Amino acid sequence: MEPKRRTIGKREFIKQCAAFSAGMFCIPGHGFRYGIEGIGQTDFSREAMFQEKTPRGIMCRICPNECILKEGELSQCRNRKVSGSVLYTLAYGNPCSVNVDPVEKKPLYHFLPGTRAFSIATAGCNLACLNCQNWTISQTGPDKTRNVSLMPDKVVSECLAKNCSSIAYTYSEPVTFYEYAYETAFLARQAGIKNIFKSNGYINPEPLRKLCKVIDAANIDLKSFSDSTYLRLSGGRLQPVLDSLVILRDQGVWLEITNLIVPGWTDNPEEIKKMCNWLSGNGFRNTPIHFSRFHPTYRLEQLPPTPLEVLNTAVKIAADEGLQFVYTGNVPGHEKSDTICPGCGAGLIIRQGYRIVSMALSGSRCSKCGKLIEGVWS
């Protein structure tokens, strides 16, 4: 049975958190209980979800890497290890980064604008992007980072204490700390808190559909529209990410897309046009897309920042292909950081960096012409 979407009272929530902390909490659909004593210090505290025994070892079925691991071996994401013929997650209750961010930083421009997201990450990633801006935590494992002890119930209580409207699973790759994100999101839902997944979208369909029951919004990095570029730049494949976009949309999760334009890698206008044409033709015309400026980092420090004219070209291509909400990222003061009504051209949300300067929405409609603007506004 999948978790129901309901909000519980404060007293019931506190009781439930107490049960969780006592190690007696069972997420519906898991069919077992587990203790949490020592999590964050002990390697083998939480069995991994979506594992399968094969003649070659234990297969992790969370993502398309589908690592098959023998006793003591570590997964590609550095977050999963086999012990006693059981696959365990090493990333549970031990985040290496905890911050309060504006939701616009994710970036999400059509989801609860002006609110704050309690943001967490553990070390690890299932891709190996040459341009990763958070490589110090993504390209390592939880045993190599400075972590804090923050179990799911504590994440929720901290979020409430800091008056955040949502919890964001972000910075590194939440697919690799799937169990931690899923079970935190489940509790957060009970407390009336929204959940945000900032991800590369490199996840198998079954785990993603289960996750969609407890998350409310996602921003997915669509890194390229070339399978060859995906492999050489990130170590992954394109099709699983496209499949994830469709699943998220069809499951009712609010979706926005980020495309980082890396000079010499993902700045080909024909490839950008092909990507935008696919999005337009597959039901994503009203899905916001953020063309983000690359800054030299990690293994691509020798490259220049993305020229502004390349970003402007990408914006024009997207508009010409019928995409309704096109933004630029990592360019402070750029005019394409504002939300403009596609009906009458009125400025609906004017932004200055991550700050909202003004809003002209009447509910979910343009206050000037009444056009429905897709998003989650309250």
Image (cartoon, grey):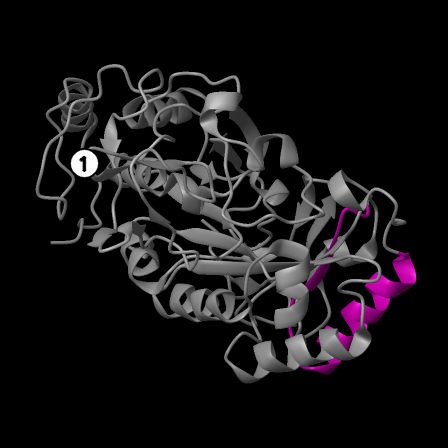
Q: Residue at x 80, y 66 (%)?
A: 267
Q: Quadrant of residue 156?
A: top left
Relative to 229, is 240 on the left or the right?
A: left
**Left or right of residue 376, residue 32 in this image:** left
Q: Is residue 108 magenta?
A: no
**Circle 1 is placed at which residue position?**
8
Which quadrant holds the N terminus?
A: bottom left
Residue drawn at the location 79% of the way across and 69% of the way down: 314
For the view shown, which residue lies furthest in the front direction?
56
Q: Residue 297 in the image: state x and y as whole percent.
A: 78, 40
Give the left or right position of residue 282, taking residue 154 as reference: right
| Start-end of magenta stretch | 307-331
Query: The residue tagged with tag 1: helix, strand or loop?
Result: loop
The reply to whether the magenta stretch includes residue 318 is yes
Furthest residue to the bottom? 281
Above or below residue 318? Residue 355 is above
The amino acid on which the numbered mark 1 sits, given as a three-letter code, is Ile
